[in-house]
Amino acid sequence: MLKITDNASLRRLNTFGINATCDTLIEYTSAEDLADVKICGSFLNIGLGSNMLFVKPHYRGTVLHSKIADFEMLDDRTVRVGAGIEWDDTVARTVKMKLYGLENLSLIPGQTGSAAVQNIGAYGTEAGDRIVSVETYDLKNHKKVVFSHDDLHYGYRDSILKHRDMENFVVTHVVFRLDKEFEPILTYGGLASHFPDRHALTADELRNTIIEVRRSKLPDPVVLGNAGSFFKNPVVSAEKAAALGAVYPAMPQFDVAGGVKLSAGWLIQEAGWKGKSLWHAGVYEKQALVLVNLGGATGSDIETLAKAVTDDVNEKFGIELQPEVRFIY
């Protein structure tokens, strides 16, 4: 069933809590609903707005919002999940079903469809590691299209569906293949220190610990508007990393495919921005990677802060940070 609202508020549909509006909001509960959607002009498909920033107070176009909430077992290891289900509900449900592989991604805000587009990641795992396929509806050609894992070209916080020329493909379902045996991944973010005996560790314990750690470091969007990690961790050449390490011996560095990953949060902190603010927008005092709405911030305020942070990091380290958050104008 379609629900159509003109001149709609988007405040509940973005975790920054920006008081933005749009020409028309269309909420849908099934893939079949999308066959009845006719759009002229600009449009945007969003989940909970957990990875975007409405820069202007009004979006001149149509916003689509998924409420597809079906959950289906395809076999004893494979689940098909509606794009409108909140991501952490998907993680909680699979762990309860004793299907494993998503627990390190606990408490990441957003919907399941958005997780597949963004290729969310945390603590050494990414959603794309477990995605078999993504089902979409092509609004331009009015047909269902399925993308295999290989079709999606997953990368660091990226997939083919994130590119602007693919915006007509609206995610309706995500298919995951999970494990029946629990093998904890504790190689990232100091997780291993929480569990002296990894052999006795359960998925519930790992999930609960990750939730506790995230809550201790990251603000609740309901209390303090934010989109989680605002910037991507930059990947630089080994030569660049070595040169920086010689000047800044304490700089965290991680070898990855294609180079060396640096900590954007550390770079921002060392540039002097941790806990600082501009107008109603600030850098979170406990985690410099997170920009926050201190109350009454506009999208433009957040954008201005992000530019100031980026400029100072670039001036100090010669590294231009790239936003993980999508800017909507």
Image (tube, grey):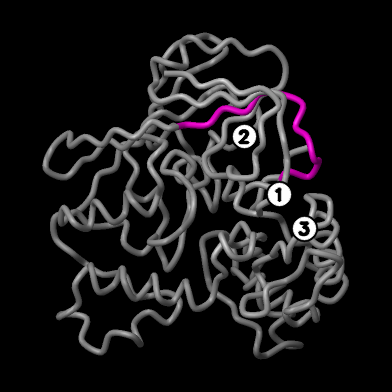
Residue 36 lies left or right of residue 237; in this view the side is left
Is residue 148 in sight in this rendering?
no
Sequence order check: which comes first, mark 2 or mark 3?
2
Whole-number angstrom distance, CA of label 2 to CA of label 3? 31 Å
Q: Nearer the viewer, residue 19 or 259?
A: 19
Q: Which range is magenta?
A: 54-66
Is residue 93 depicted above or below 287 in this figure? above
Residue positioned 33% across, 85% down in the render: 194
Position of residue 117 in the picture relative to residue 29 (left or right): right
Residue at 35% x, 36% y is 174
Q: Where's residue 1, x and y in %?
A: 41, 18
Which mark identifies residue 50?
none
Find residue 305 and report its horizontal and vertical position in percent: 82, 62
Q: Is residue 269 above or below residue 196?
A: above
Residue placed most toward the observer, 314 or 14: 14
> In which quadrant will I find the C terminus?
top right
Q: Secondary structure at mark 2?
A: loop
- Is 135 left, or right, of 329 in this rendering? left
- Kindly indicate whether the residue at mark 1 contacts the one at mark 3 (C-beta within 8 angstroms): no
Residue denoted by label 2 = 163
Task: Please state which amino acid type lies under the numbered disc 3.
Answer: Gly
Tell me the amino acid under the disc marked 2.
His
SS category of the residue bearing label 3: loop
> As displayed, is residue 296 above or below residue 62?
below
Residue for badge 1: 18
**Dot placed on the residue nearer the N-terminal end, 3 or 1:** 1
Q: Is residue 65 magenta?
A: yes
Measure the C-alpha gap from mark 3 to mark 1: 8 Å
